Image (cartoon, rainbow, N blue to C red):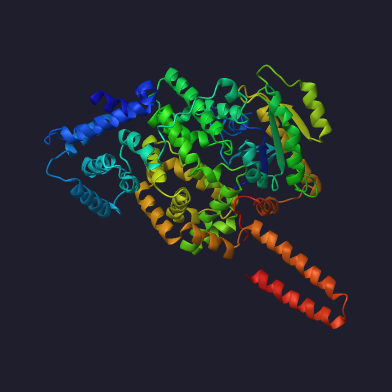
Amino acid sequence: MEDYKYLFKIVLIGNAGVGKTCLVRRFAQGVFPNVQGATIGVDFMIKSLMVNDVKVKLQIWDTAGQERFRSITQSYYRSAHCLILVYDVFSQCSFDSLPQWCRDIDQYAGAAIAGNGRNVLKVLVGNKCDKDREVPLHIAEQFAHNNNFDLFMETSALEAENVEKLFREIAEILVSRNQESNGGTMSRSITSNSFNQSSKPSNCFNCFSN
Amino acid sequence: MTDMCSSSTSFEDLGDEENDSSLANNNLAQSLLQKFESLPSNLCYDGGDGDNEETIADIQSLTSSDISGKELWIFCDKEFDNQSNSGKSRRKSPLDEQPKIGSIIRCLLNSDIDGLKKLARQKFGLLNDSLRLLVWPKLVKADMIETIPRPDNREMETHPFYTQVVMDVNRSLKRFPPSIEETQRLSMQQQLIQLIMRVLIKNPSLYYYQGYHDICVTFLLILGEEMAFHVVDSISRTHLKQHMEKTMETTADLMEFILIMVDEEDGQLGDFMYKSGVGTIFALSWVITWFSHIFRDYKTVGRLFDLFLADDPMLPIYLSTTIVLYKKDDILKLDCEMAVVHQYLCSILEREEDLPIEELIIQAKELFAKYPPDKLRSLQKIKPRSIVTKRKEHSALISLIFAILDKGAKFSFIPITVTMVLCAIVYQQYLSK
């Protein structure tokens, strides 16, 4: 048995090439891949961190960005505790796609429950902030506000800017939500049991029931 | 003649205009065939590691005048049968290959496509890139005479998939052998974009998917741009068509066959995988890129392409199944949890040297014979174990029950009770299925 208290599932979504895989690898492995091939399907990485003396394990799912894979990756939204929608601050096009992604989130994760009775934590991330920007900060902030995102941040996987901070804040919010709803007494086994049950994508490629 | 032979296996020459034209290829075929026919019989294998030397030496050493084409065939088949269950090494000895090269060249001489397909499926496939250059276009009956004007830049750049293609190609560095210099790689990446866009513009009904570029890289490396275009154009309308529809629904359906076969072949493993809820997305990149996205060994990828070009478009599904079955013992040791099983399955091919590819190919063909696609489709109908299917059925049944109850309410009390009891029995039966 691993000695973590909470296990949270985080799913990264967003257009192809906005840097989802690089964000995950920067956070989980501390590296920035110079040339990162396209993600086909889904993959995940694990990283543990301490939040208020509590060990939290983050299972971070990275998804293919191309639109035609969405029907496959959407099934992974449902069981997520947190969805990170990533765009590229250097690409207006990736920002313009956000409304469609938001509709997908509402449709497939709207009813998803992270913790007790709360909706999934919605995070907007503008990656590649080391580059010249096409998307102004205040426009993105406004978008995040109007679309009920719980958190908005600009990051740079290349320069490791805000990456650790992003995942740490997410972990802190998820921990505090869990502690609030359980009076701080939730045991690891309860969390991981509920996670296990919810972690089975219900609409993926041939996911079978027990 | 020798120069032309060597150019076919040297990456440095792959981008040459000479190789880009079908004319050059025909000349190459002629030179190989002439070499095959004319070289003395006493030359032997030089043991070189590179495909280049190997090919030439193989061609030289197989031209023993006392072995007729027919005898070569027999020898090759016997060799194949004897070694079908042998060890893991991909290449046993040059002797394995020599008679086969004779067979391949004989088939090329006689335009025996069925013979070439048979050889491509057999152990070690088409052996090396020189032979692939000659045989692959024949396997897919690529129309090399048809000339398609290259689309102009504007036409390409305004195409809906252009941005995605450029993005994927620009980050496909890993797919190019390290022996290729950067400047040449960059020019090949441009050729790759042209190649993909030409196929997409020529076939407006085909939808590009991420991973298609991985398949195209392999063809570009081995065939050069022009020939690769004809071959990719051909297989996109046959082998890859199922993945190039507007949605990935068909692909998703086909992938379901993996678990159906695993379950049929090994109930314990099937139960474990169903229970974990792992699905089949772990094999998505295996199937839609013909394993080229994940296998690092360029030679293994070439060998698998021999097989897939010569065989049924569904074969990648069968090979994926044999890989899962081969790893049964390791899978059953895992925690029965989706993420754990998914991660393990995704990592299997990273240690490709552990996989006895030739053996797995034989098993895949056996699986194909045992569970042809039609049989799998009927199994899929009678084994609706997927959550999707089950949920659909479940809601349909519930609506039916309520509809009956609603109708029943208009009549007297007794039929309602009877209906309810009947419904309950049906529902219980359904649940226990």
Residue reaching furthest to the bottom:
B414
Q: Is residue A52 visible?
A: no
Q: Position of residue B306 (x, y in %)?
A: 37, 42
* In this rendering, position of residue B264 left or right of residue B358: right
Q: Eyeballing the image, is A187 above or below B162?
A: below
Q: Is residue A27 left or right of residue B371?
A: right
Quarter containing the C terminus of chain B:
bottom right
Residue farthest front in this picture: B146
User: Is residue B5 something that shows in the picture?
Assistant: yes
**Quadrant in the picture for residue A58:** top right
Q: Position of residue B96 (x, y in %)?
A: 23, 44
Relative vertical location of residue B229 with respect to residue B307 in this rendering, above or below: above
Which picture quadrant has residue A136? top right
Total count of labels: 0
- Look at the picture and state if A131 lies above or below B248: above
The percent position of residue B280, horizontal first and vertical second, equals 55, 50
Q: Nearer the viewer, residue B100 or B342?
A: B100
Residue displayed at 68% across by 23% down: A91
Q: Is residue B71 left or right of residue B420?
A: left
Residue at 67% x, 69% y: name it. Answer: B431
Q: Nearer the viewer, residue B223 or A3?
A: B223
Q: Tell me which residue sits at (36%, 39%) in the image.
A: B138
Q: Where residue B85 sits: x, y (%)?
A: 30, 54
Q: Quadrant of residue A208?
A: bottom right
B15 left or right of B164 in image: left
> On the rendered image, what quadrant is the N terminus of chain B found in?
top left
Which residue is nearer to you in this view: B374 or A198? B374
